Amino acid sequence: MPKKGTKSKKKEVDDVPNQQENKLPDYLELQRTRVVCNDDAPIYVHTFICHSSLMAFHLLIMITFITLALHMFPCEIVCLTQGYQHSGTFAAMGVDNSVSVEKFCKNFKIEINRLTEDDMEFDMIGIDASIANAFRRILIAEVPTMAIEKVFMVDNTSVIADEVLSHRLGLIPLDADPRLFDYISENDVPNERNTIVYKLHVSCPKGSQRITVKSSELEWLPEGSQLSMSAPAHSGDKQKTFTSFSQSQKEILEKPLGVKFKDITIARLGPGQAIEFEAHAVKGVGKVHAKWSPVATAWYRMLPEVVILEEIKGGKRAVVAKPRACTLCRECIRPEESEESTEGASEAQESSAPWKQIELRRVRDHFIFTIESTGSLRPEVLFTEAVKILEEKCERVISELS
């Protein structure tokens, strides 16, 4: 039978971890949540330990919530889910740092700062760099678009070779929604569901000035190809073309197809020169060729922090006006050449130097994400499509593991 007071002592011992739970010393909390930048290069050490199937499951949940949030709250701060952390790192100190969907629901949010027709900037808070980089790579290489793939050259007397001209045509952004079209394989017949046909016929009359051929000269052919593959055997036979459209694309599309920018220079023609061709656009992704990449650029950076460690004397209080605009050039923390060459300086003089009173940091789980669209889809639509692709990948991983 326990002595008197034993129960109360045990209770006090049991209460100690609860009092210290979710608390870390300041220096450890700084190391866990921030990347401190030295005057030469940033320090970023990341260790990741997680069971693959568990990670895929939590990642799938996270992506699903992101998709719902973008549809329901396109311009609001949204709380979602997450499944990444350094499992058991601070378990001895009573801090649970393991993978938890609940934690992700509590911490993750999206803040849209700028949204235009061509670009957007938003903050992704509460995720790891690997997830942000996954979205960046998918946007560049795996979100499909429409681009010119085949060019049937009828006449080209310009100074630009056929191959160079075809390459230039492939890089012209098309005003066509790729979600309305199917992929085409080598064995498929080009039809109204997988091919867009354009034609161009421009000539410069003799004796006139040089002319510039712009992308606005490309004419959409909703009925399909007009070039015959071979002459018909009999006069009454139907002409066989390079496409097989069963109906006009005007009947299945809400708006006419064209190019996104009308002022792109294709070629310049001198007197007596001409260009005539037919171009076929198909659906593809950027990892096959850069012409199918839907973004001019997609990039992210950690949120910078400029911290004044001690009050700077000078009559007025110094504050950081625009820390978000910091490019981390490190000029504010780089010592002067005269200070570097001075030997025998006291510690007090060194600590009072301006470059010792400022610290540059980056928030480890706060990313400023920028998307610049080439014009085929709006930037917020591109990000939604990237989320769907990542969700499909997670589902595929889970199905393979199960």
Image (cartoon, rainbow, N blue to C red):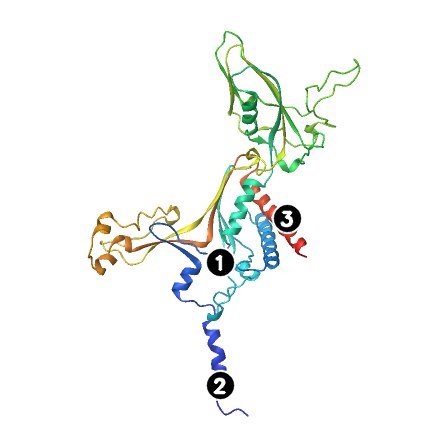
Q: Quadrant of the C terminus?
A: bottom right
Three-letter code for the amino acid on which mark 1 is drawn: Thr
Q: Is residue 24 above or below residue 179?
A: below
Distance between the Cα atoms at labels 3 and 2?
55 Å
Number of marks: 3
Does residue 309 appear left or right of residue 182 in this picture? left
Report crowding for label 3: few under 14, some 14 to 19, many 20 or more residues within 10 A (C-alpha): some
Q: Quadrant of the N terminus?
A: bottom right
**Of helix, strand and loop, which one carries label 1?**
loop
From the top left corner, tell me how far across and down residue 157 is, in percent. 55, 14
Q: Residue at x 71, y 27 (%)?
A: 248
Q: Considering only order in the chain, which callout, 1 or 3, is on the residue closer to the N terminus?
A: 1
Q: Residue at x 67, y 25 (%)?
A: 222
From the top left corner, tell me how far across and down residue 338 is, in percent. 21, 48
Dot 2 corresponds to which residue?
Answer: 8
Does residue 201 appear left or right of residue 329 in this picture? right
Dot 1 corresponds to which residue?
Answer: 47
From the top left corner, tell me how far across and down residue 374 is, in percent. 53, 35
Q: Nearer the viewer, residue 386 or 340?
A: 340
Q: Nearer the viewer, residue 221 or 44?
A: 44
- Is residue 115 visible in the rendered image? The answer is no
Dot 3 corresponds to which residue?
Answer: 392
Three-letter code for the amino acid on which mark 2 is drawn: Ser
- Is residue 232 visible in the rendered image? The answer is yes
